[in-house]
Image (tube, rainbow, N blue to C red):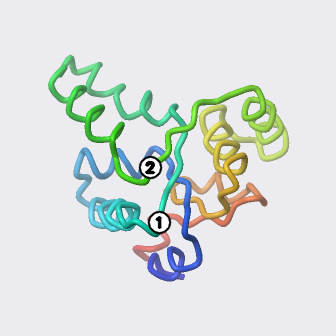
Amino acid sequence: MGLAEFLRRHRRVALDTSIFIYAVEEHPKYVGLAYRVLEWVEHARHSAVTSTLTMTEVLTLPYAQQTKQRVNQYYGLLSRYPNLEWIAPDLEIADLAARFRASYRLRTPDAIQAATAVRSGVRGFITNDSAFQRVDELEVVLFDELLS
């Protein structure tokens, strides 16, 4: 299955942190796919969700490198991205994440991302982490599989 086919089946998708990191850091292998996904999200008929945890993960390296300008750039770009909904974990997401950790052996950040998607009514999940393929509630597409 290709990216275009996956996106045709979903009007709303969930995005894992890696998609944003590939785009903002211009990862040589994945930047093209990341840009295609984000351009798709920009269209009025489409939308995406991600956990606010994504912002934590995206900003960690710029903070570690003490590049305040990059922190501000990433925060400004991502926090106002069109058709992207940032969802903060609440008690329902926390409970579902705990169930996903127990059932699918996910790390806490991954469980929160998966629970955010499911709680938001999203079935399509875009990532490059194969751990998400264990989550029965999601249809997952991996960048590495798209490139192979």
Residue 34 left/right relative to 141: left
Location of residue 31 with respect to 85 vertically, above or below:
below
Foreground residue among 135 and 124: 124
Residue drawn at x 45%, y 80% as measured from the top left: 4
| Residue at the disc numbered 2 | 84
Q: Give percent across and percent down for residue 131.
A: 64, 51
Q: Secondary structure at mark 1?
A: loop
**Category of crowding for the residue at label 1, using alpha-carbon neighbours closer than 10 angstroms: few (below 14), some (14–19), many (at least 20):** some
Q: Give percent across and percent down for residue 48.
A: 50, 55
| Residue at the disc numbered 1 | 46
Location of residue 2 with respect to 35 vertically, above or below:
below
Q: Secondary structure at mark 2?
A: strand
**Category of crowding for the residue at label 2, using alpha-carbon neighbours closer than 10 angstroms: few (below 14), some (14–19), many (at least 20):** many
The kind of residue on which mark 1 rests is: His
Q: Give percent across and percent down for residue 59.
A: 34, 28
Residue drawn at x 59%, y 78% as measured from the top left: 9
Q: Give percent across and percent down for residue 58.
A: 37, 34
Location of residue 57 with respect to 25 vertically, above or below:
above
The kind of residue on which mark 2 rests is: Leu
The C terminus lies in which quarter of the figure? bottom left
